[in-house]
Amino acid sequence: MMSEEIRFSCPLDCPNSCAMLAVVNDGIITEVKGDRKHPDTRGLICLKGKQHLYRLYHRDRLLSPRKKLHDKWVNISYEEALGEIAEKLVSIKQKYGSQAVLHYYDYGYCGMSKTVDQLFFNYYGGATVHTGGLCHQAGLKAQEYDMGTSRAHHPADLINSGVIIVWGRNPADTSVHFARYLNQTKKKGVKIYLIDPLCTNTAKMANEHIAIKPGTDGVLALGMARIIIEENLADIEFIKNCTLGFTEFADKLKLFTPEYVESVTGITPVKVRELAVTYAANKPAAICLGYGVQRYSNGGNNIRAIDALGAITGNIGISGGGVNYTDTQLGSLIGSEFEKSLKFAANRRAFTKARFADFVLNADNPPVKMLFVTRANPLVQLPDVNKTIKAFENISFKVTVDMFMTDTARHSDLVLPATSIFEEEDLFNSGDYVNYSHKVIKPLNGIIGEYGLFQILAQKVGLSSYPLMERNVFFQNELRQLLKKYNLNLAQLKENYFVRNKEEIPWKERAFETPSGKYEFYSEKAAQDGISPLPVYIPVHHGSDNYPLRLLTPHYKGSLHSQNFAFTDEKPVAHINMKTLAKYKINIGEFARVSSENGEIKVRIEPDEKIPDDTIMIYQGWWHKSGSVNCLIPDAVSDMGELAAYFECFCRIE
Ligand SMILES: Nc1nc2c(c(=O)[nH]1)N[C@H]1C(S)=C(S)[C@@H](COP(=O)(O)OP(=O)(O)OC[C@H]3O[C@@H](n4cnc5c(=O)[nH]c(N)nc54)[C@H](O)[C@@H]3O)O[C@H]1N2
Ligand SMILES: Nc1nc2c(c(=O)[nH]1)N[C@H]1C(S)=C(S)[C@@H](COP(=O)(O)OP(=O)(O)OC[C@H]3O[C@@H](n4cnc5c(=O)[nH]c(N)nc54)[C@H](O)[C@@H]3O)O[C@H]1N2
Ligand SMILES: [Mo]
């Protein structure tokens, strides 16, 4: 028997991209495990990583193109499938223009080779594509106003911090390596606070959990800023030399007394003061921001208010500090082929991603005639799923590329199978490192991965400029700037582990990428965009008599979004505390109905004392066969960056 271990990378949309090994026996993968030799991920992988093998050989996996014929799915050949898609693409463009095709994509798979879907639609002439997003776009925009872009310290630098605030992030469940660094730092005696409405698994890693009322982080941050300035704990030198608009910012803080902060956030004046003083007096202090803070109508401003804490205390640009959100530095060095393709996309049209359904239902000139979905499961992950189903029904021809018959695939007309991570060679950017992933086995049943698929389609449609290059040439071109900066060639990148310098401190030179080159408390750019130039608190929404309960739908440890909910038919689990259950006369062990203005689902009740009063927590990702939690969620959008404000959802339980 031939047995070998082959290196590959986790392809999932999380900040980790764990390096992994596939154990192959006679052409069959029998085991996957962490790659201990990787300098950053060091052999540790999570539940979702272990599931790749299960997904690879699962009996429900799509292994052939399929077409819906009189409501039945039949397998068809690639020749027929791609022929029909090409014919539609040509005729729709002739009749309505290329924007009549809507390309919906996300990051269900994060390898570089599968970004060719975007290239394809650019060479097609430009399709209708999204702006904004479902993930972290409010925070990105906020940090763009403040600093020019988002940069984060390597998590190994946490060890140099004097105190750490984990703010609206749940790394214990969503980022195992970040959690590992956090644990190490705690062992060294560094104090860690967690600010989160829910007492998550990350609370166990913190010294103290501060339960804030949802959507009120802006008030807490502005209240902390007031105390820091009053107590002369601000870094006057940093403020003077490196920032813009401090006086205007400080003038607006009068309202945010500790008592006012308590009335909004539920955090006592003593605690607010302790947080402010501990953060300011234990320099360097790190804030580690998650995406939970910004999934609100006021999400962008909340992030700007938190950023300001880093700036008034001079905790930006120093080891152990930072307002760490996400890092865009490596990413900005990748994508030359995409840049090139944009020249061909003259007819691109944009829609706000979270408002997909409204856009499709109202699009005119031209209407949406075709939908092409790649790397995404919008019928589960978009807000307002019922409206999204109607929007789907409004589009006469829909194609989805996926590994499984997801709800999105089911509501399409034609489905193409996607290769899994083991079946193609690829490269992954985690933010802190780039992982090379070998092709481990041949694609099952000869299925064609997206790299090849779009080349065939380009030829069938007659896109003569579409790059028909070898995959390696594509990698080489895409990575040109990165290879140059780090003085590497592609072969070296593939053979070795590439990790960005852990000692590199973001904004060390204090040369911010804002128009003024300074940290901008006052952003003229924000004013030009029609929003407040200073971070402000936009009052959070509250429930009504009809829908009094706040619904939070965070990310589940055992699944990347909807992906592993494929394997359950159970009803969604609603986590609620006993007091709230009693208030609404719900018995333990019962099923209940949760409804909102947008829809309803049947749930199984799980009493959970870690959930605050008048709140329901249901993990996001459940498929329609279980009950789609996003059918409860309105398509609200954040104040900045056009982000889906998922946590702005109120419901009742019966
Ligand atoms: N209620 C609520 N909803 C949310 C969120 C929330 O917090 N609450 N979070 C939001 C966030 S942060 C995000 S990022 C979005 C994510 O939204 P999506 O990215 O749409 O979510 P996934 O469920 O990961 O869907 C990805 C799909 O890609 C498929 N796939 C895997 N590999 C490949 C491949 O190689 N090619 C192709 N074509 N497909 C492949 C998977 O099988 C899966 O069906 O969801 C958002 N939705
Ligand atoms: N296992 C697993 N890992 C994942 C993912 C997954 O689906 N599953 N998804 C990946 C993706 S695409 C993303 S975007 C990341 C997301 O990673 P995280 O940012 O860690 O996760 P979220 O679920 O968005 O929310 C984080 C926390 O914010 C809290 N929160 C909610 N409202 C508020 C608020 O008003 N204030 C404060 N302070 N906190 C609040 C929530 O209770 C939650 O614990 O995870 C990535 N990793
Ligand atoms: Mo995300």
Image: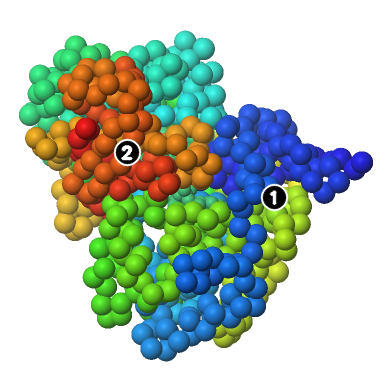
Task: Kindly indicate the quadrant of the structure image that contains residue 601.
Answer: top left
Q: 144 above or below 478? A: above
Location of the N terminus by quadrant is: top right
Give the foreground label among 2 and 1: 2
Task: Kindly indicate the quadrant of the structure image that contains residue 242.
Answer: top left
Q: Position of residue 263 (x, y in %)?
A: 11, 23
At label 1, counting other C-alpha atoms closer than 10 Å, the crowd grade (few under 14, some 14-19, many 20 or more) is many
Q: Is mark 1 within 8 Å of ligand 1?
A: no
Q: Position of residue 227 (x, y in %)?
A: 18, 21
For image coordinates 43% across by 46% down, the residue present is 625
For image coordinates 26% across by 68% down, the residue present is 361
Q: Which residue is mark 1?
A: 422
Q: 188 above or below 320? A: above
For image coordinates 43% across by 16% down, the residue present is 204
**Which callout, 2 or 1, points at the residue further toward the start of the chain?**
1
**Front residue of 520 and 23:** 23
Q: Does 620 sit left or right of 43 as displayed?
A: left
Residue 136 visible from this viewpoint: no
Q: Which residue is mark 2?
A: 602
At label 2, counting other C-alpha atoms closer than 10 Å, the crowd grade (few under 14, some 14-19, many 20 or more) is many
Location of the C terminus by quadrant is: top left
**Front residue of 319 and 30:** 30
Q: 105 above or below 91? A: above
**Front residue of 307 and 59:** 59
Cα distance between the residues tagged 2 and 1: 37 Å
Q: Secondary structure at mark 2?
A: strand
Total tally of numbered discs in the picture: 2
Residue type of the residue flagged with mark 2: Lys
